[in-house]
Image (spheres, helix red, strand yellow):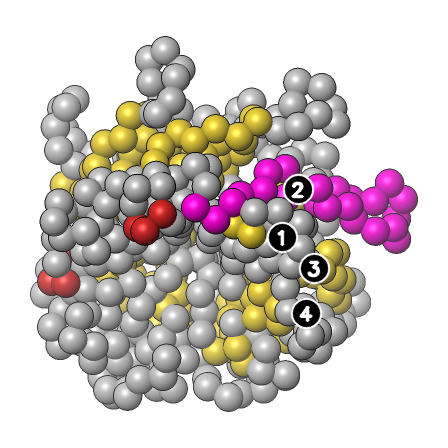
Amino acid sequence: MASRTVFFKNALTSAMLVVLLTFSGATLADGQTETILHTFTFGSKTDGTYSWSSLLYSAGVFYGTTTGGGAHNRGTVYQMSPPTSKGGPWREKLIFSFGSTTGQDPSGALLLNATTGKIYGTTLGTGDKSDPRGTVYELTPPPPSGGPWTEAVLYKFSGGDDGAYPESGLVSDEQGNLYGTCAGGGQGAGGVVFRLSPPAQQGGAWTETVLHGFTIGGIHGSDLYGGLTFDSTGSLYGTTTFGGDHTCNAGRGYGTVFKLAPPPDPGGAWTASVLYTFHATDGLRPYGTLVFDSSGSLYGTTYQGGHGSKDFCCGTVFRLAPSADGSVPWILTTLYAFADASDGENPRSGLVFDATGALYGTTTQGGINACIIPYGCGTLFKLNPPAQQGGSWTKQELYQFVGGNDGWAPQASVFLFGNKVYGTTSGGGPDNAGTVFEITP
């Protein structure tokens, strides 16, 4: 893989009438089986509500976040432990509840420091009602003798030049610096890419540096909802949901893929370049985090576009390959364009590779007609690479969510472990508060 090896391990992310369909352990006609590991409880102080993030795996245990629920109903970090005996239930435990002084409404993926066991993440709110711009936080595990996890807020965003609303998760380098994106704020009000540097002495303050600020409607793009990906040189790659071509979308643009190259000398400016600008027919509004393959090509999804005149239906999976001479734009290939609701539509998550080179992802909508929503409750899909060079990728639908106890609207990337796929849904379950699922293809 071309992506950078870091000492942190990255995570590998409206009320509706609930139809009480029991799908835990259900088997589809072509053999896929879904098992519900946990259903979240609406309004509970001891459980979370609405999971928008992917799962973080460490030492046999999953960790994730919910945007609501918990002791103060402002979100949680939870732990999922496997059964103690074969066939037994998975066990969910809240390890932290957000409140008035600890940040509020976490939504991005979690990041683990494999050496210390500390977990890092972001929240969309600060807890300060007059200035709810988001935070970066650190969770420290309890000592061997027991006790609670403890939280420290590493940085509060002001909503000015430093950015606002860190929607996605974080990545880290070997020095322990944290990198992330903000959907808003910055000098151009279009979001920022930031770095948080640890203090020189224990107990000191972390330092935020804006590596690049984006301008609403600017050529580099704006509105950064996806996370960042490193390459082997230390450059960062990401997507913007709007911006790029001024002639599209009433001047707001349909989104970009960008690169930030580090300065040759410490303390210098990072260099931003646009690798690709979307124009609806090839996809629009990328949200998910990008992934590399071994050749240095990037893979991702767009939420809409991809079908000519059907500009706003239904999203794509794309590959972006470097041009032979290193110039921009890079070469975009649409690996799959979702056709309609029955096919799945509106992928918001990033993608995950398996050992064979196949890609896994989710769509937030589309799928089976029996869903509680007319346009579908979402799908889990697999894209198989072509058998011969130059051939077409083939889509395999692994699961169609029905919107009952099995969940609906998966928003986050999935996690592959063995022959199973793990993930979360933002809705569904008995309380329509979301689920954690396991699917055996």
Q: Earlier along the polypeptide chain: callout 2 or callout 3?
A: 3
Do tag 1 and tag 4 residues touch (Cβ < 8 Å)?
A: no
Amino acid on which disc 1 is placed: Gly
Q: Earlier along the polypeptide chain: callout 4 or callout 3?
A: 4
Work out how far the residue at label 2 is from the one at label 3, CA to CA, in angstroms: 13 Å
How many neighbours does mark 1 have within 10 angstroms: few (below 14), some (14-19), or many (20 or more)? many
Q: Quadrant of residue 32?
A: bottom left
Work out how far the residue at label 1 is from the one at label 3, CA to CA, in angstroms: 7 Å
Q: Residue at x 83, y 44 (%)?
A: 199
Q: Which segment did they paint magenta?
A: 194-217
Is 39 placed above or below 257 here?
A: below
Task: Give the side of residue 102 with respect to residue 277, left or right.
Answer: right
Do tag 2 and tag 3 residues touch (Cβ < 8 Å)?
A: no
The C terminus sits in image quarter: bottom left
The N terminus sits in image quarter: top left
Do tag 4 and tag 3 residues touch (Cβ < 8 Å)?
A: yes
Is 236 placed above or below 287 here?
A: above
How many neighbours does mark 3 have within 10 angstroms: few (below 14), some (14-19), or many (20 or more)? some
Name the spot of residue 414 as percent of width and height, x first. 38, 54
Q: Residue 210 — which label?
A: 2
Name the spot of residue 14 as percent of width and height, x first. 37, 79
Q: Residue at x 16, y 31 (%)?
A: 386
Q: Secondary structure at mark 3?
A: loop
Amino acid on which disc 4 is placed: Asp
Do tag 1 and tag 2 residues touch (Cβ < 8 Å)?
A: yes
Is 321 placed above or below 185 here?
A: above
Residues 382 and 98: in front is 98
Q: What residue is pinned by disc 4?
A: 131
Q: What residue is pinned by disc 3?
A: 158
Amino acid on which disc 2 is placed: Val
Q: Earlier along the polypeptide chain: callout 1 or callout 3?
A: 3
Q: What residue is pinned by disc 1?
A: 163
